[in-house]
Image: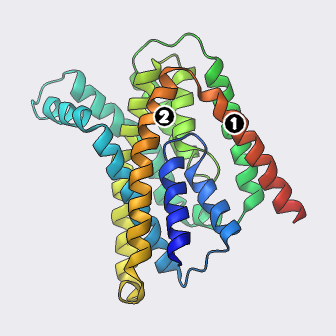
Amino acid sequence: MEVVDALILGVIQGLTEFLPVSSSGHIELGKAILDTNIASKEENLLFTVIVHFATALSTIVVFRKDILELLGGLFSFSWNEHTQFCFKIVLSMIPAVIVGLFFEEQLEALFEGKVVLVGFMLIITGLLLFLAGRARKTGKDVSWKDAILIGISQAVAMLPGISRSGATISTSVLLGNDRAKAARFSFLMVVPLIFGKIAKDLLDVIQGETVIERVSTTPLIVGFLAAFITGLLACTWMISLVRKAKLHYFSYYCFAVGALAIFAGLVL
């Protein structure tokens, strides 16, 4: 992988992991446009691990105070608000864990240059954002039932082109939850999943060929820094946008990019 390609893909990952436009979909589109030359599956997996770790780290940095408060409440060993929030996050993770464990091969097959599929999924993301942008009755806390439904939307967002943040925040807002709390829950619920996926993917890399010895570290470092820095900016910006009910602006972008992807996949 070239350094410039790593920089561009790192920026795409950092921005789209938090902005509701689908990081997986844009990464696939970016690879198709750049015609990125990745020597092996292990090298591709290693780069994915690096940039996902970068965005997970940026989430921790942005929500460091919230995470410390949650951990403090959890280790007080009482059924307080923070402990309940942590268990709601665990509950929300279950659908994605089930899908990831039992349908991994089927999901991986969808990440092989299926540009038309990405286009249709982006349009679905756009519809969710548009509806969430028009929601008016938003003010309650995330309930246990909400946590399950938001978790299901996160599992669906494992499809390329469905934005994880867009799907989970939109679902939460449409359920009537406070916008700021919806964004907080959406970003924090994914951190354990990301680190779990990173650990699994890293194990797959280690068990594969000795790709680490043959891969240049420069593109990996560039990709990591690009994803981390842009992730910090995008996460902070996204929180502000959700609070101001500006999600519907991204729906127009998803409609446009989705239509272009479908056209490119069918015609070009």
- Tell me the quadrant of the picture where the C terminus can be found: bottom right
Number of disc labels: 2
User: Residue 158, relative to residue 176: is it above or below?
Assistant: below
The picture places residue 143, in percent across and down from the top left corner, at: 40, 21
The picture places residue 222, in percent across and down from the top left corner, at: 42, 68
Residue 54 is left or right of residue 173, and the answer is left
Tell me the distance, in whole angstroms, between the alpha carbons under discs 2 and 1.
Answer: 16 Å
The picture places residue 242, in percent across and down from the top left corner, at: 51, 26
Specify the label residue 201 is tagged with: none
Few, some or many residues within 10 Å of mark 2 (<14, 14–19, 20+): some
- The residue pinned by badge 1 equals 126
Residue contact between numbered discs 2 and 1, judged by CB atoms under 8 Å: no
Going by the numbered disc 2, the residue's amino acid type is: Met
Q: Nearer the viewer, residue 7 or 21?
A: 7
Q: Who's the residue at 46% across and 51% down the image? A: 98
- The residue pinned by badge 2 equals 238
